[in-house]
Image (cartoon, rainbow, N blue to C red):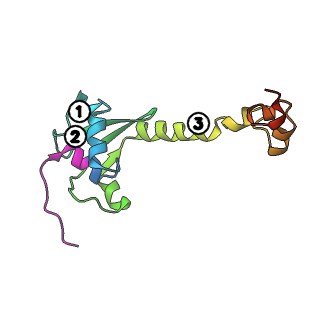
C-alpha cells in the first residue's frame, strides 16, 4: 500500500470518517452540522480545515469524547491504524469507560415486566378472544 503524502490540513468531516469515528462522511457532516462536534472549543462546520494538534470535542450519545489530533489521513484504513490519528485525553477515557460500565449495570427493560405477553394457550382461554371473528351463530 503506497504511503499517503503528509498533509498539513484536512476537512473535518473527512478526518472524522478516516479516523473511524463515524461510519460515513455524510454522518460525520451531519453531526458537525448539529453542533455535536467542536474544534478548539468553538462550534464549527464540516468544511473546517483540521490540523495536527487541534482539540476535538465529540458528543456521542451521553458521552463527550475529547481528542487531540495527532495526524491527518484521507484514507479510511483498519481500526488500529485509525486510532493512531488521535489521542484521547485521560479524563475523556475514564468518563467513557464509566458510562460503559453504567450501561452494563443498568436494568434490563424486560425484567420489569410482571406478567408479559400472553402465550398462545393464554390467548385461547381469554373470554373475549373471539369477539373479532366472524361467526355464523352470531345472532345478528
Of badges 3 and 1, nearer the viewer stands 3
Q: Earlier in the sequence, mark 1 or mark 2?
A: 1
Find disc 2 in the rendering and name its residue: 54
Number of residue marks: 3
The residue under label 1 is 40
Give yes or no for contact between labels 1 and 2 (Cβ–Cβ under 8 Å).
yes
Q: Residue at position x 79%, y 37% from top?
A: 135
Is residue 115 in sight in this rendering? no
Is residue 14 inside the magenta stretch?
Answer: yes
Dominant SS in magenta: loop
Q: Is residue 21 left or right of residue 73?
A: right
Instruction: Please give the range of residues in magenta.
Output: 1-15
Q: Closest to the observer: 107 or 90? A: 107
Q: Quadrant of the N terminus?
A: bottom left
Q: Viewed as shown, does residue 15 lie left or right of 58?
A: left
Q: Is residue 17 above or below residue 140?
A: below
Q: How far apart, in angstroms, are the residues tagged by discs 1 and 2?
A: 6 Å
Residue 73 at x, y percent in the picture: 21, 56
Picture coordinates of residue 50 (x, y %)?
A: 18, 43
Question: How busy is the neighbourhood of tag 1: few (under 14 within 10 Å), some, or many (20 plus)?
Answer: few
Does residue 110 appear anywhere in the picture? yes
Residue at 32% of width from left, 32% of height from top? Answer: 36
Label 3: few (<14), some or many (≥20) within 10 Å? few
Where residue 23 appears, as percent x and y from the top left, is 35, 50
Disc with the residue nearer the chain's start (3 vs 2): 2
The numbered disc on residue 102 is: 3
Amino acid at each position: 500500500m503506497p504511503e499517503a503524502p503528509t498533509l498539513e490540513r484536512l476537512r473535518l468531516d473527512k478526518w472524522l470518517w478516516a479516523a473511524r469515528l463515524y461510519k460515513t462522511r455524510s454522518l460525520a457532516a451531519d453531526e458537525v452540522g448539529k453542533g455535536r462536534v467542536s474544534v478548539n472549543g468553538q462550534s464549527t462546520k464540516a468544511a473546517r480545515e483540521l490540523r495536527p494538534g487541534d482539540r476535538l470535542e465529540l458528543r456521542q450519545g451521553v458521552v463527550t469524547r475529547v481528542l487531540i489530533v495527532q495526524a491527518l489521513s484521507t484514507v479510511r484504513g483498519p481500526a488500529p491504524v485509525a486510532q493512531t490519528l488521535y489521542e484521547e485525553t485521560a479524563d475523556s477515557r475514564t468518563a467513557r469507560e464509566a458510562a460503559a460500565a453504567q450501561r452494563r449495570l443498568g436494568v434490563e427493560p424486560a425484567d420489569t415486566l410482571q406478567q408479559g405477553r400472553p402465550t398462545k394457550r393464554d390467548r385461547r382461554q381469554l373470554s373475549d378472544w373471539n369477539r373479532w371473528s366472524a361467526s355464523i351463530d352470531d345472532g345478528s
